Image (cartoon, helix red, strand yellow):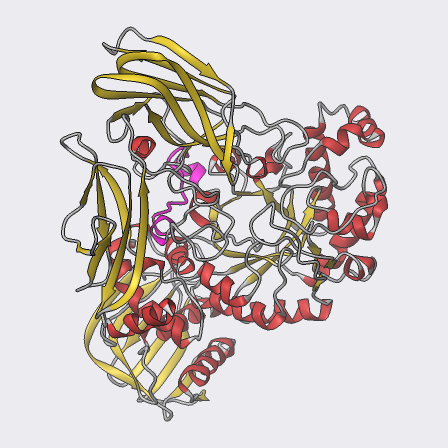
Amino acid sequence: MRIFLLAIALHSCSFLTAQQIAIIPQPASVIVGKGSFTINASTQIKFEGSGLENSANFLNDYLKKIYGFNLATTTKSAQKNVIVLNYERMDNPIAGAYRIDVTGSSVYIAGDNAEGVFYGIQTLIQLLPVELSKSLAIPQVKIEDHPRFAWRGLHLDVSRHFFDVDFIKKYIDFIALHKLNYFHWHLTDDQGWRIEIKKYPKLTETGSCRDGTIIGRYPGKGNDSIRYCGYYTQDQVREVVKYASDRYVTVIPEIEMPGHASAALTSYPYLGCTGGPYHVQQTWGVFSDVFCAGNDSTFQFLQDVIDEVIALFPSKYIHVGGDECPKTAWKKCPKCQKRIHDNNLKDEHELQSYTIRRMEKYINSKGRQIIGWDEILEGGLAPNAAVMSWRGEKGGIAAAKEHHTVVMTPTTYVYLDYAQKRNEDSVVIGGFLPIETVYNYEPLPKELTPEEQKYIFGVQANIWTEYTGNPAKLEYMIFPRASALAEVAWSPKEQRNWSEFEKKLPVQFKRYELWKTNYSKAYYDLKASILPDENNSGLLWKLETKFPNAQIKIDGLGNSSSLYNTPVHVTQNVSLTANCYLQNQLVSSATQNFYLNKATGKKITLTNPPAVEFPGNGGAFGLINGAVSKKYGNFSEWLGWPGGDMEALIDLGKDESLSKINIHTLDQKRGRFYAPSYVEVFVSSNGTDFKSVGKTSSFVVDQDNIGDMTVTFATTAARYIKVFAKNAGTIPEGQPGAGNAARMLIDEIQAE
């Protein structure tokens, strides 16, 4: 019911009229004139160059589907009531530049190539009114535009959950409508092999099916025991590739190697180090059974697969995965150890590099190049490889410095399987990624020189589908964040402006509704933030809403609801709920439980700042803001130190009687999260002379892998508290992410 009411509310708020321009991504130049041009059933589309049929057909298909009519096409001269498509030379290093001139009698769209004209059509579509009509008035306007990045990508994992060809085509249309141009199709993984390989029929006969799926968030609450299958025939793949090509979208296939291989090993057990038995995985995670890198038959298999993949996909790049490959099986495998010895390799990490390099050499011999996740840097990067930097920007920076092509796709900014709401209403993989964060991403790292930045080929958003099993949920997860990505990928940096983008969102939401597409309305959710009280006497709970003329009422302060006007002063443990009403209809809610202690709201400093991907809610203040996370998955409250230690200094303002310090932390090895190896507490009355009062290595789980590490000591008086948490260090073999730095997350320090 709440979603229905919110949809009504969105329709009732007309922030922009039909004549105002709301183009996403923002063009390089827009000059608005006076008056309008009207498209109706008698309007014609005129070609002034060959090869423009795709653009005309796309426009006509859109008009027919959305507005119920299409237009006649002609190559004859026409002066009025016409949309002219033409070529013009434009000086832009990246293909796709175009210009539009809308007058009272015609629309003129010119591109530097057919792709540019097609992008002009996408802009024309965004000039159309978002109300249904047979007469479509668009404003008179002059637009000149060009793409910023050559790679503007959107990824889809179809291994965890399968999506049929009809939806894949719809997904490609989403890509095209946003002027994106790469579709990264993740086709193989532990949970299912999704592409027909004729030489190895068992890959789809056996590997495309799993015998059940976990229920709920990993590790799950049981298994549904429902056989889950799906794959694409080669004819279907060709159909998708052609469909994408007509929309100037390049399809990049991903065939995982050497890890994420359970489905392939189940189909052909000889490809593994032990010979099995194996099974297609029914849960999520990283699994130790990987392709045997010491077995020549493994490379023959991978080469045969690549041969058929290359025949289907004309893309320059073939994605080979290369991520999350445990080395446990290789360490125990005599063949793998022999391969290491015979090739003078240092260790199993160099064996992974050997595998990638060998496959790269083969793929290069076929006239193609490889691209892989940033783990392919480990043990030495293959000579011609391109890198997708997903574990932050570090891998991309390193690759660009070595003059390798890089696509930036860091989890912190562009992983669309992360939550859009602080309290999602369905299960997601975790993390918190609001649309503002996506929009504000800058793909060119400051650590690179201008010359090195030239190797940043573009940006891509990814969506993994462990918890996304149907089209409606997938659409909800990508929109409106994919629209924010489009502006990051296309628009000139100087033209990007969050406040201006916000003004366009209501119209964009109406476009989604015209498309009959699901989308998240989290943008309109109440935004709640916790602030320190200037008088050092508690906390302030601040609430904001994007709805104009909305009313916010607070429950939990007394026996009745209170109308919100100013931030709520919190001085004791309390549970507060805020309800936002628009025209007496509930449109959004927020709840916050506060747990106050002697450290709450006090002054805090950190010796070692948290990582950018885990900044916490309010930075260091988030460690003493009275908000304690009780559920795994929403990391908005957590501060994180991947590979680093935490040292926090808290000034209580005066001497207080203390006997216990508690830190709230997390130990979830699937996500590479480890509780500190130990926590030590120091106290001082003058801020200079500190003494240790205790140390603990004990982690006590509360629920959902979340728990506490508590240091108790004899009652002592102190004004200053120093809390040191030691990172667990390198992730051990046999665990997901083995060999990488452990992530240490802390979300609250409590003093009693």
**On screen, residue 74 above or below 246:** below
Q: Is residue 497 shown to the viewer in this render?
A: no
In which quadrant of the rendered view does residue 447 lie? top left
Q: Nearer the viewer, residue 687 or 75?
A: 687
Q: Is residue 289 shown to the viewer in this render?
A: yes
Residue 296, horizontal then vertical, whole percent? 84, 40
**On screen, residue 612 above or below 726:** below
In which quadrant of the rendered view does residue 128 lie? bottom left
- Which corner quadrant holds the N terminus? bottom left
- Which corner quadrant holds the C terminus? top left
Residue 481, horizontal then vertical, whole percent? 40, 57
Q: Residue at x 76, y 23 (%)?
A: 344
Residue 543, horizontal then vertical, whole percent? 23, 50
**On screen, residue 432 above or below 700:** below
Report the span colored magenta.
435-453
| 539 left or right of 356 in image | left
Q: Nearer the viewer, residue 319 or 699?
A: 699
| 464 left or right of 515 in image | right
Residue 555, horizontal then vertical, whole percent? 25, 53
Number of numbered labels in the structure image: 0
Q: Residue at x 41, y 85 (%)?
A: 45
In which quadrant of the rendered view does residue 201 lie? bottom right
Q: Residue at x 19, y 74 (%)?
A: 33
